[in-house]
Amino acid sequence: MALDLFLPKKSKNQRPIRVAQQIKEVIAYAFLRGEVPLQKGTTMITISHVDMSPDLKYCDIWISLVGEDAQEFLKEINALDWFFKKHLAKNMQLRFVPQVRFKQDLLEEKAKTLEQKIIEANKK
C-alpha cells in the first residue's frame, strides 16, 4: 500500500501523458539538432520529465543542467517561449499548442547530498 503513493495516478484520460511524451521528444530533438537559438551553449541538458495540465494548455518541462549557471540559463530559455510554441506547432498536430515553462529539476542534486549524509552517518 505504501508504494502506491509513488506510482502515477491512473486517469481515465491518458492523452496528457501521451502528449507530454511527444513534447519531450520534440524538444529534445530541437536541442540535439541545435535549433534552439541560445546566446551561449550549454555543456549538457537533460529533460527529466514533462508535466501537462489536464486541458493540455500548459506544459512544465523539468530539466537538469551540467556546467551552466542554472538560474541564468532558465531565464534565457524561458524567454524563448515563442520559439518552443512555434516549434511544437510545426512538429505536432494539436488543437491548442501549450504554453511551455522550463523548470530546474533538483532531484539529482538532492540525491547526491542525501547519499553524502548517509555515508557520513555510516562512518560514525
Image (tube, rainbow, N blue to C red):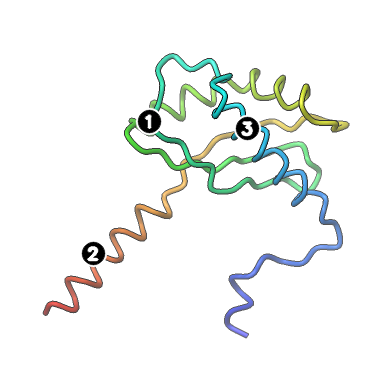
Measured in 3D between alpha carbons, the distance from the residue under mark 2 to the one under mark 1, in whole angstroms, is 25 Å
Of marks 3 and 1, which one's residue comes earlier in the chain?
3
Q: Are marks 2 and 1 in contact (CB under 8 Å)?
A: no
Question: What residue is shown with label 3?
Answer: 27
Residue 72's image quarter? top left
- Please state which of residues 28 and 105 is positioned toward the viewer in this rendering: 28
Q: Closer to us: mark 3 or mark 2?
A: 3
Residue type highlighted by circle 3: Ile
Residue 98: image x %, image y %? 74, 33
Compared across the picture, whether 93 is left or right of 32 comes to: right
Residue 70's image quarter? top left
Question: What residue is shown with label 2?
Answer: 116
Residue 101's image quarter? top right
Label 1 element class: loop
Residue 123: image x %, image y %? 13, 77
Could you classify mark 1 by the number of other residues whose Cα lies within 10 Å: few (under 14), some (14-19), or many (20 or more)? few
Could you classify mark 3 by the number of other residues whose Cα lies within 10 Å: few (under 14), some (14-19), or many (20 or more)? some
Residue 93: image x %, image y %? 85, 31
Label 3 element class: helix
Q: Which mark is on residue 43?
A: 1
Compared across the picture, whether 49 is left or right of 115 comes to: right
Residue type highlighted by circle 2: Gln
Measured in 3D between alpha carbons, the distance from the residue under mark 3 to the one under mark 1, in whole angstroms, is 17 Å
Whether residue 121 is situated above or below residue 30 in the rendered picture: below
Of marks 2 and 1, which one's residue comes earlier in the chain?
1
Outermost residue toward the bottom in this view: 1
Could you classify mark 2 by the number of other residues whose Cα lies within 10 Å: few (under 14), some (14-19), or many (20 or more)? few
Report the residue at 69% width, 38% height from top: 23
Of marks 3 and 2, which one's residue comes earlier in the chain?
3
